[in-house]
Amino acid sequence: MRNDILNIKNCKRIAVMGGTFDPIHYGHLVAAETVRQELDIDKVIFIPTGRPPHKINSRLASDEHRYLMTVLAVVTNPHFDVSRTEIDRPGTTYTIDTIRELRKKCSDDTELFFITGADAINQILTWKDPEVLLKLCHFVAVTRPDSSTVKFTENVKYYKEKFGADITMLEIPALAISSTDIRKRVFENKTIKYLLPESVEQYIINNSLYTDDTGKKTYNTDLINKKLRHALTEQRYLHTQGVAEMAVRLAGIYNEDKDKARVAALLHDCAKCIENDESLRLCREYGVPLDEVLLAQPDLCHSFLGEKVAENDYDISDKDILSAIKYHTTGHAAMTMLEKIIFIADYIEFGRKNFDGLEETRNTAYEDIDKAVYMCLKQTIDFNRKKGRLIHFLSLEALNYYSNIIEKGDKT
């Protein structure tokens, strides 16, 4: 184990910025510099995480690679430094332990700040010892200028009243850069120039990072569930558990990846409980096309928006999983097996209240998934038409496609 050599002896205001930094990019650096300048911070300490409990996708570059990339990124700024405290600590790393350790190295009158995103503040009660952590340091929640702050404001008020928390919200320049996207671009042999410091780009190239995607990804479903509990109503959360159970069952029948089925099922409604106005705003922010049906019936946006939320908030990069989330409501012609499984599982999970055709569709799903997809589409479209609702063109195309498949099957 190496010891940190941090020059913080005369620092009265220190900010900590934690993250996997896999890899570090200009978005991280802009946020840190903005906080430093606006809050008169003497030193910003970047702390690459070791084994973070909050990361759902467990495949990371090695600790040493992430540490060295962070060093390369901050070396030219005399107000920035990097600590090895988390990557050298054995076992799972928690923010509370890091802050306590850093506090021991500081003077009694040193004020500690912790930089994080507004979304993390909304989830902070899922962290270890949150009531203690909120008292040990001043939290700085960085947001983009167009971000909604309704939920954040409500939570901050609660934290201040309940725990005496000191939380500041700070707008930073909007840079649409993510580590997930950078890794994906490297794997797809696309340029990452100007998304991160040139020294970090060269390090990635020299060490062939993010080019091998042959290993199977694993996901922290415990954390997914913990985050969903805060994002969904209790009824919707229970529904996702039922969909996951059914999706895994169908995956076993149709020889599909059960892990992918479980994750896609758990996250299929991850954007379901977002208010309609906010949902439309987020769709525009993420570039989700809004056709006339979605504009007229914003509740349908949740599946298309869910794809983006799963990617950005839950660290999901698997295209099969994201696509299954995207089309679980409308369906589309020629769906993949995973898409069909999530589409059907959402319809026939055991928590559904009984209705005409449910049991027949459920039994059919165990034997002929294409026929079950057709039955689900027809029943749903008929129901919505009776309610006077618009039908999305993807659903109509899917109904026509699977109707032809069933018709051909009946003739053979």
Image (cartoon, helix red, strand yellow):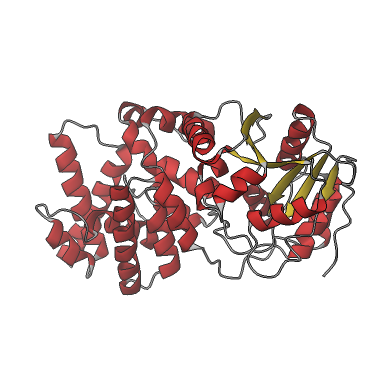
What's the residue at 30%, 37% (across, down)? 392
Q: Is residue 46 above or below residue 170?
A: below
Q: Is residue 22 visible?
A: no
Residue 24 horizontal/vertical position (percent): 74, 49
Left/right placement of residue 232 relative to residue 366 reads right
Residue 173 horizontal/vertical position (percent): 69, 29
Q: Residue furthest front?
A: 108
Q: Residue furthest left?
A: 356
Quadrant including the N terminus: bottom right
Residue 238 horizontal/vertical position (percent): 30, 55
Quadrant including the C terminus: bottom left
Q: Nearer the viewer, residue 161 or 96?
A: 161
Q: Nearer the viewer, residue 235 or 160?
A: 160
Q: Is residue 91 visible?
A: yes
Among the 4 quarters of the image, the one containing residue 118: top right
What's the residue at 42%, 33% (across, down)? 279
